[in-house]
Amino acid sequence: MMLLNPLPRAWLGVSHTPLLGHNRLAPEVDSDLQQAIAMMRDQVLGWQPDRIVMIGPDHYNSFFNELMPPFCIGTQATSVGDFRMPQGPLNVDGDTALGLATHLMDYDFDVAVSRRMQVDHGFTQTLSLIWGSLESPPLVPIFMNAVAQPGVPRVRRCRALGEAIGGYLDTLPGRTLLIGSGGLSHEPPVPTLDHPDAAVRERITVRSVSSPQDFEVRMQRVLAAGQAMGAGTSPLKPLNPAWDARWMDALQSGQLEVLEAIDEASIARDAGLSGHESKTWLVARAALPRQGLTCAMRWYRDIPALIAGFGILFMHTKGV
């Protein structure tokens, strides 16, 4: 249960795209995006969080179909360095991660725990954009499966998990920033088990370590997909700004029950197969009070060349 007067808490919902900095954008689009990122950075750093709880997905760099948990908390985490992102350890607060896992188990959430979690750009891009490296304040990373059905968490479960996380944070001192990294509408060329090539199905099933050459080949494939989408010649599902606006509206207003009314099958149909990543925003947002927050930043732009309905929402408890 939330305290009546919760400790200072902030929420950042932010999209990520590994094509940022790789695919060329129109000057006006690039300028607008860079200004938004700079404003996000200033807002977060100005709020001065003592710790971060970050919910993010993976793109078959760390979690595979041979064993795919809906959620997993890391007590240690290392970046795999995909898409030329920073590689190395994250500043994980192992004690807080274990405390959160214990609390969730006590409240009937059977979360997985990784003592050696690996993460990809779904975590590292946002950390790098804000802190310039992986040297962030102490961090608790929470992986959320957003690609492998049927184990993609449902909207109502994401909301309930966020509320349970908020209950644990009520017991901790200091200022906590919750980050949901992912979404919004987009359908990059991430393979599924329906892929006709058996070798591709095997690659996303059996846990493996990608070589630098593997990363480069996959990066070039995704870059080409973004270039085709930017040129209007892509067979991929187009971005859906209207869907993105409704998702952001519900989170900003605190009317989370609006999202729970969304049919699960419609998410992939309307927002793309990777639209489920948007649920990371919901988990993080649900850890804050529904009402009475200050919205310090809201920005959105659909950017086909980055295969991203790119949104940023930053809110925090009032007076702090």
Image (spheres, rainbow, N blue to C red):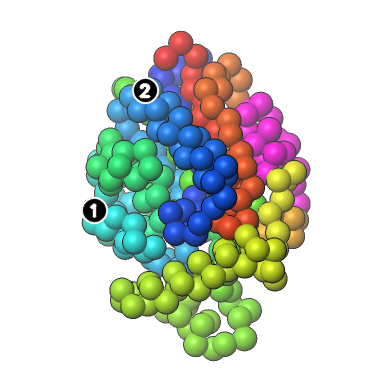
Check residue 293 for magenta coloring.
no
Type of amino acid under label 2: Gly
How many numbered marks have been drawn onto this rendered protein structure? 2
Most common secondary structure along the magenta stretch = helix
**Residue that label 2 marks:** 46
Residue 213 at x, y = what percent?
A: 33, 78
Q: Nearer the viewer, residue 125 or 280?
A: 125
Residue for point 44% across, 59% down: 22
Q: Based on the displayed image, in which of its 4 quarters is residue 29 positioned?
A: top right
Q: Does the rendering let one see residue 158?
A: no
Of the numbered discs in the image, which one, if any, rests on residue 157? none
The extreme bottom residue here reads 198
Q: Residues within 10 Å of mark 1 (few under 14, many from 20)?
A: some
Type of amino acid under label 1: Pro
Q: Which numbered disc, 2 or 1, marks the residue that appears first in the sequence?
A: 2
What's drawn in magenta, residue-wise?
A: 244-264
Disc 2 is placed on an element classified as helix
Residue 44 at x, y = what percent?
A: 40, 29
Residue 196 at x, y = what percent?
A: 62, 86
Residue for point 62% across, 42% down: 301
Q: Based on the displayed image, in which of its 4 quarters is residue 112 positioned?
A: bottom left
Of the numbered discs in the image, which one, if any, rests on residue 89? 1
Where 254 falls versus 148 (above or below)?
above
The extreme top residue here reads 319
Residue for point 49% across, 50% down: 16
